[in-house]
Image (cartoon, grey):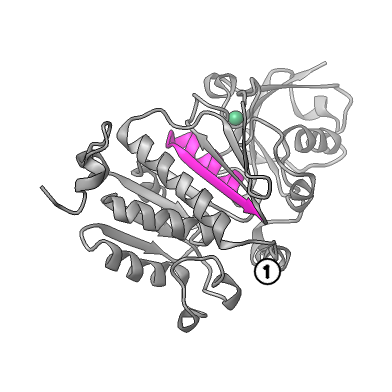
Amino acid sequence: MSGRYHRQQLIDKWDQEKVTESTVAIIGMGALGTVAAASLAMGGVGHLILVDLDTVEISNLNRQLFYRSTDVNKPKVEVSAKILEQINPDIKITPLNMPIEEVSTEILSKCNVIAAGLDTFQTRRWVNSFVVSHNIPLVSGGMYGFYGNIQVIMPKETACIECQTLIPEHELQKACTPFGEVRKAIRGEEEVDAYQPAVSSVSFVIGGLMAQEVFKIVLGLKPLSEYLFWDGDAGVFTSLALQRRENCIICSDHYQLRETIIHSPSDQTLLDFANQLRYSFNLGPNMRILYKAKEIALTSDYMNTIFQSGAIFRVVDPLLSFPAKFKVILD
Ligand SMILES: [Zn+2]
């Protein structure tokens, strides 16, 4: 036998049928997304869904595998789809030129794995909350200069991105910029802010690792359980064991089974309470509180004039793909 997949089928634990039958979404077709996509297409992942709203820029060409000078200003997903069809004409490619938040849940929830190489923490947090609520494994990679990292989130099994405070301080500050109506303007700011040092060698290492973890998940093998950090300057890999946080707003059983319990003095103002929520759970300034199916204005009214102790309310935030549920205990 000497078919396209012959050499990988010589690997002990390989099962080409599983790979061929799988659907993988790649969020972000930048340096990591293009490298991972090339590898997954070569390996024969049956259906690749590509999500990115950006167009190719000249400064992408030093590290983003699929793009040439003649592609500048073209949508990344469309250029990528053409290249991937050449790499492997036997697989299906679906290019989606839109922000991840606008991709239909029906499409994403059918994925066996989601791989994300995202440059903003806001989007990473949104994807994290989405995969946890839909129980889809997430392979997330990041790179900065000579450094790279990768983390696999197996919902309810491993720590999610929200479980630990690996969110850099400046990212948290950025998360405090308004969302919603001005989202576009913010994306503009992010682009300016995204002038980060980046080189192709790091995207190949981390993008390759991401594809490896996707293959393992599809094959039913145990994926990486620790946060893997690569220092490409020193040539050192470091593993960091992560623990699920018991009161994680996104993935804790506590939350899944019931709701996150939060205490508040009766005579605290609603505004102070909202700020406490934001601080405790890294929520953004456009967080809204829904109570009895209505939005409540965050005013200087006292907690006990609005809530009875034990009241259950929900929080909606552009950083989360679903409303978080809380029970408030008035002390
Ligand atoms: Zn978590």
Q: Is residue 170 magenta?
A: no
User: With 136 as the anchor, is 265 left or right in this view?
Assistant: right
Direction from residue 3 to residue 8 in the image, left or right: right
Asked where in the image residue 273 lies, by quadrant, the reply is top right
Identified at 50% across, 25% down, the residue is 156
Vertical side of 233 occupied by 254: above or below? above
Q: Could you tell me which residue is drawn at 59 percent across and 19 percent down?
A: 254
Coordinates of residue 20 in the picture (x, y in percent): 23, 46
Seen from the viewer's position, the closer of residues 86 and 168 is 86
Give the amino acid type for the residue marked by disc 1 in the picture. Gly
Dot 1 corresponds to which residue?
188
- Residue 182, x across and y down, in percent: 69, 64
Observer-nearest residue: 238 or 27? 238
**In the image as oriented, which residue stretches furthest toward the left?**
1
Check the image and report above or below for 273 versus 185. Answer: above
State the extent of the magenta-drawn residues as a range. 124-144
Q: State the residue lying farthest toward the front.
A: 234
Classify 327 as above or below 49. Answer: above
Q: Position of residue 234 (x, y in %)?
A: 68, 45
- Report crowding for label 1: few under 14, some 14 to 19, many 20 or more residues within 10 A (C-alpha): few
